[in-house]
Amino acid sequence: MSAADAIVAEFRAFGAGLRRDKFCARSALDIVDRCEANGVGILGIEGFYLTDTTTTPQLDHILDLSTGMKAYDTARQFLRHGEGLPLFYEFTFQE
């Protein structure tokens, strides 16, 4: 299991979606903190609206960090921008 997989597994109890891999802003901020502490790079973060039957990606809530995978402060700012919205976030990690 990779370090990124282990981090997501720790938070899966708080996750949503079919694979429980989408997280509210609070959990997503904690995941960024854990990634920074463990040196895990984040390639991107995508925001979604979830209902019981649909997962709708939000094109205005996508962060591409592929050029600066360790831009943890940028990731935090992005997540704080969406606080208060009913968004859930999915991560793409550097493997």
Image (tube, rainbow, N blue to C red):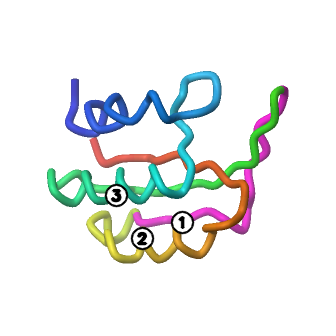
Is 45 on the left or on the right of 33, as rendered?
Answer: right
Say whether marks 3 and 2 touch (CB < 8 Å).
yes
User: Tag 3's secondary structure?
Assistant: helix
Question: Residue at 27% of width from left, 41% of height from top?
Answer: 95
Sequence order check: which comes first, mark 3 or mark 2?
Answer: 3
User: Dot 2: within a 10 Å radius of its alpha carbon, few (fewer than 14), some, or many (20 or more) residues?
Assistant: some
Residue denoted by label 3: 32
Magenta stretch holds residue 54: yes
Q: x and y percent of residue 49 in the render? A: 75, 48
Percent x, y for residue 85? Answer: 71, 63
How far across and how far down the image is residue 81, in percent? 59, 75
- Disc 1 marks which amino acid? Leu
Dots 1, 3 in contact, CB < 8 A: no
Determine which quarter of the picture holds residue 59: bottom right
- Report the Cα–Cα distance between label 2 and label 1: 11 Å
Of the residues shown, which amino acid type is indicated by label 2?
Arg
Residue beneath disc 2: 76
Which of the two discs, 1 and 3, labels the residue nearer the N terminus? 3
CA gap, disc 3 and disc 2: 7 Å
The magenta segment: 53-65
Label 3: how many Cα within 10 Å (few below 14, some 14–19, many 20+): many
Q: Which residue is mark 1?
A: 63
- Sequence-wise, which precedes: disc 2 or disc 1? 1
